[in-house]
Image: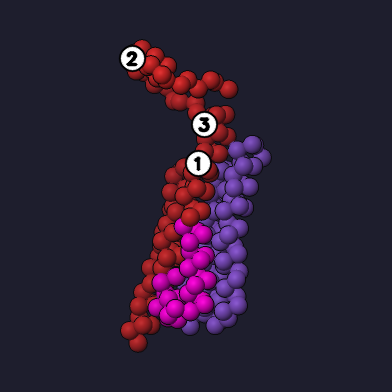
Amino acid sequence: MISFIAAAMAMLLMLVPAGVTMIRGTLADAVVGYELVTSVAVMVLALLAEGFKRPSLFELPVLLAVLLYGSGLVFVRALERGL
Amino acid sequence: MTREIITDVLLALAVLTVAGAALGTAVMPDAYARLHFVTPAAVVAPAGVTLAVFVREGLDYSTGATFIALVFMVAASPFLSHATARAIRVRERGDWHQAAERPAETSADRPADKPGARVREPR
């Protein structure tokens, strides 16, 4: 159980470089960083649900994985049309 | 005991993959190069997490839900990466069809000169 929570914490820590890229980079870099952060967030939610033994919380990563594609395309479209 | 070791190894593999992807995203010089590092974090690491949940829980609701999330991520990630690269190119050049400077072609190489060729009109 503790290994899942530790893995979730480690993955959250790995979001710091992506966050720095989003803040300091260009708009295209920020979109790429956003895609990385969303992918990692899906895993963090799944790891926390497993780590805390709450099967009902597995709805969140599934929902976020579905929304990942649509939300990513929204940002990509905005990037293409010139934010 | 063996099951726990396998779970820990799979989780460590997933964390290392995410670490490599995060560092690669931060270090690479431009957005095209950064984009290559999103795919491992969206495909390889979720597979490791799903396998870890499967090894720990067996065929359970948790494994099924994680597997569904994995399927969506594996399916969406290539399309999203392609769309992002295309959008960056459109933003930089105005049109993603626009070719870079190339040496002059002979008339035999041009698609318009071949019989039955369909020519794309410039926008």
User: Residue at 48% of width from left, 64% of height from top?
Assistant: B70
If you read the primary sequence from the N terminus, does the residue marked by circle 2 or circle 3 appear first?
Answer: 3
Q: Position of residue A81 (x, y in %)?
A: 64, 36
Which label lies toward us, 2 or 3? 2
Chain assigned red: B
Residue on which disc 3 sits: B96
Q: Colour of chain A?
A: purple
If you read the primary sequence from the N terminus, does the residue marked by circle 2 or circle 1 appear first?
Answer: 1
Q: CA distance from mark 2 to mark 3?
A: 25 Å
Residues tagged by mark 2 and mark 1 found on one chain of the structure: yes
Quarter-of-image position of residue B45: bottom left
Q: Residue furthest bottom?
A: B1
Helix, strand or loop at mark 1 = helix
Q: CA distance from mark 1 to mark 3?
A: 10 Å
Q: CA distance from mark 2 to mark 1?
A: 32 Å
Residue on which disc 2 sits: B108
